[in-house]
């Protein structure tokens, strides 16, 4: 028998601590509340609507303008945020962060202390959601690839007209590929915590974005930049909007969400986002770990766990898509084409995604985000302190307030769910025949409740 | 104006329901924020490495905050285990029996203990 000496290693990997699972009672309570509230919202709003609705819906989302306001402070804010100086300032911030990241990627050390990992997986991917929710399309505003593209176009002496028109039938399908590539990198690829692969991923992203931007203009970013598509989707739940004349207005989050129009690939985008986040919860659960380590056949074939992860990262979004499409297409209709329903109702998944992102990433974003801020001050791991944050102690507030955290998680999932049902309901009122309003929405409601209970189960189990 | 009254009624009903939900969930949360201080002896976890397999395998092991954790490793070949706390720690073990003391943990949460050579999760420490 011998004693082993501990060695503190600067191993690869971000964020050690994971949250405790939420208590069973809270998960059940959340699920029951989601169920009850859904039915109350459905029946109450449908009754009120039936009393006030005049004509039969036409089977298409209404073209009516959402309710929006332009109070005095918005009128004052508009010239500032619409000014060239403002957008140049934001672009400059984006370019500075970009230059900083290029530096850490090229001359930073390949250890867990390199801030690039935290910036890539936490600030960028997770931080995108709260920023877009608060400020609107945040990535579009600071996107360095947009800035470089504009500079390149100006240097070429181009007229601003792109070389080709973006093929609209592709919709946002290219972004689906990008989102899957990110999810694979984050959740499946075993060497995702080494500098080389992260650098390569980012290099390919930047290259594709710059070539695409030169060929198809800024439309390319709206449709194909996975981060811009994600950010702008979440921004539809913010209060910020622009009216027909391009003036800044404020809307209710659901009113804003209702301005999201169906396009090819939209259903795939929401299913990939939701499915991969759910897989992120599931892959840490003991049954999955046990299956990968001790499962028959799997444990005797060295590559099987990796194969299994690859299958799962595709299977989860697919399962979400099948469940969602069946649920929406079973919704009662006469003259509406069933195949259009998933796209019409796709906005309703957005609040569910946001609620689940909050539940799943809140404490991680808080803790690993701070750790990244600490590392960012010493980007080259040479003991320097660029921003004065290298001595920052990570604050474990949520870890010490486990009950509060569990409550926030349940509330986030339930609120996301309720807004999802409500949003689906707003669309249903626009597209469904009136006689089917209540019964027609039952399959949709069951789908939504399925998502919520599934989400709560995973937060409870893993 | 009837329309706008109905609209406000609708919004009011939904907002009220939402607030009710938030209140209920918050009220029902039990308060278990106090650190459990009554940790008696150290938690001893037996780990056995045999070929490509390890026992335990991904099991959740509950540990009290402040309780010492020790691993009693029995292995056929030498190797190392990684404790994914913050900061991460690494311990070497030899063929035969090795006693590893990893100290205690104060931040509640889950910490994975892995063998990187086998690419396997040995256990998950649940610090409560």
Image: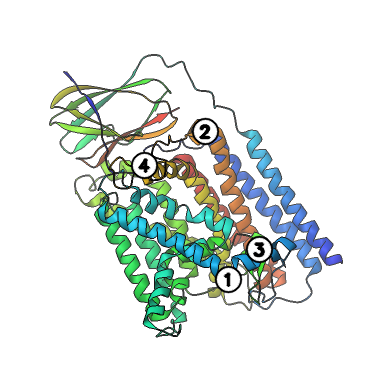
**Along the line of sight, the residue nearer the viewer: B120 or A389:** A389
Q: In which image quadrant can residue A385 be found? A: top left
Q: Are marks 2 and 3 on the same chain?
A: yes
Q: In which image quadrant can residue A240 be found? A: bottom right
Rendered location of residue B86, percent (x, y): 36, 34
Residue A216, numbered label: none
Rendered location of residue A293, percent (x, y): 27, 42
**Along the line of sight, the residue nearer the viewer: A369 or A81:** A81
Q: In the figure, A175 relative to A33: above or below?
A: below
Q: Chain letter of disc 2?
A: A
3 or 4: tag closer to the N-terminus: 3
Residue named by callout 4: A385
Q: What is the spatial separation of the Cα atoms under label 4 and label 1, in whole angstroms?
A: 51 Å
| Mark 3 touches mark 1? (CB < 8 Å) | no
Q: What is the spatial separation of the Cα atoms under label 4 and label 2, in whole angstroms?
A: 33 Å
Judged by depth in the image, the label closer to the viewer, 2 or 3, is: 3
In the image, is B9 to the left or to the right of A318?
right
Residue A77, numbered label: 3
Residue drawn at the location 49% of the way across and 61% of the way down? A323
4 or 1: tag closer to the N-terminus: 1
Q: Secondary structure at mark 1?
A: helix
Residue named by callout 1: A344
Rendered location of residue A105, percent (x, y): 29, 55
| Mark 2 touches mark 1? (CB < 8 Å) | no
Q: What is the spatial separation of the Cα atoms under label 3 and label 4, in whole angstroms?
A: 36 Å
Which quadrant is home to the N terminus of chain B? bottom right
Q: Secondary structure at mark 4?
A: loop
Q: What is the spatial separation of the Cα atoms under label 2 and label 3, in whole angstroms?
A: 40 Å
Near mark 3 (Cα within 10 A), the count class, few <14, some 14-19 or many ≥20, is: few
In the image, is A304 to the left or to the right of A62?
left
Residue named by callout 2: A402
Q: Chain letter of disc 1?
A: A
């Amino acid at each position: 028998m011998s004693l082993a000496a501990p060695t503190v290693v600067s191993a690869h990997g971000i964020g050690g601590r994971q949250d405790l699972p939420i208590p069973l009672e809270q998960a059940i309570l959340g699920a029951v509340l989601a169920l009850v509230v859904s039915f109350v919202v459905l029946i109450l709003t449908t009754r009120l609507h039936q009393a006030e609705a005049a004509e039969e819906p036409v089977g298409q989302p209404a073209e009516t303008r959402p309710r929006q306001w332009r109070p005095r402070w918005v009128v004052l804010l508009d010239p500032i945020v619409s000014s060239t100086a403002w957008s140049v300032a934001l672009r400059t911030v984006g370019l500075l962060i970009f230059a900083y990241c290029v530096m850490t990627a090229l001359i930073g050390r390949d250890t867990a202390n390199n801030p690039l990992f935290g910036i890539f997986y936490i600030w960028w991917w997770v931080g995108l959601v709260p920023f877009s929710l608060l400020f609107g399309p945040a990535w579009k505003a600071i996107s360095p690839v947009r800035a470089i593209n504009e500079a390149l176009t100006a240097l070429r002496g181009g007229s601003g007209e792109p070389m080709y028109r973006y093929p609209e039938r592709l919709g946002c399908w290219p972004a689906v590929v990008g989102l899957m590539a990110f999810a694979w990198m984050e959740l499946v690829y075993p060497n995702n915590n080494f500098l080389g692969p992260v650098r390569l991923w980012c290099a390919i992203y930047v290259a594709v974005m710059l070539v695409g931007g030169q060929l198809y203009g800024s439309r390319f970013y709206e449709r194909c930049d996975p981060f811009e598509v994600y950010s702008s989707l979440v921004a539809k739940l913010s209060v910020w909007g622009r009216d027909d004349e391009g003036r800044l207005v404020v809307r209710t989050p659901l009113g804003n969400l209702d301005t999201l129009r169906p396009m090819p690939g939209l259903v795939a985008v929401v299913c990939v986002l939701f499915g991969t986040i759910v897989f992120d919860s599931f892959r840490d659960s003991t049954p999955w770990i046990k299956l990968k380590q001790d499962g028959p056949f799997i444990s005797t074939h060295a590559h099987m766990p990796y194969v299994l992860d690859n299958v799962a990262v595709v299977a989860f979004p697919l399962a979400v898509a099948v469940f969602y499409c069946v649920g929406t297409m079973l919704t009662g209709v006469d003259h509406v084409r069933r195949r259009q329903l998933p796209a019409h109702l796709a906005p309703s998944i957005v609040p569910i995604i946001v609620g689940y992102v909050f539940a799943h990433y809140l404490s991680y974003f808080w803790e690993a985000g701070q750790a990244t801020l600490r590392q960012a001050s010493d980007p080259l791991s040479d003991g320097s302190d660029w921003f004065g944050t290298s001595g920052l102690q990570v604050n474990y507030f949520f870890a010490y307030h486990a009950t509060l955290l569990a409550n926030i998680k349940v509330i986030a999932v339930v609120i996301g769910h309720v807004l999802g049902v409500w949003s689906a309901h707003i669309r249903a009122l626009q597209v469904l025949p009136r006689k089917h309003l209540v019964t027609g929405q039952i399959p949709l409601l069951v789908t939504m409740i399925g998502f919520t209970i599934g989400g709560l189960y995973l937060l409870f189990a893993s | 104006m009837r329309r706008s009254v109905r609209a406000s009624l609708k919004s009011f009903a939904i907002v009220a329901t939402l607030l009710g939900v938030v209140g209920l969930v918050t009220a029902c949360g039990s308060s278990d924020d106090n650190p459990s201080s009554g940790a008696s002896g150290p938690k001893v976890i037996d780990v056995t490495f045999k070929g490509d397999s390890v026992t335990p395998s991904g099991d959740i092991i509950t540990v009290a905050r402040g309780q010492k954790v020790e691993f009693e490793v029995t292995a056929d070949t030498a190797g190392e285990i990684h404790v994914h706390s913050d900061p991460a720690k690494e311990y070497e073990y030899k063929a035969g029996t090795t006693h590893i003391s990893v100290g205690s943990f104060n931040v509640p949460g889950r910490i994975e203990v892995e063998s990187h050579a086998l690419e396997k999760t040995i256990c998950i420490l649940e610090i409560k």
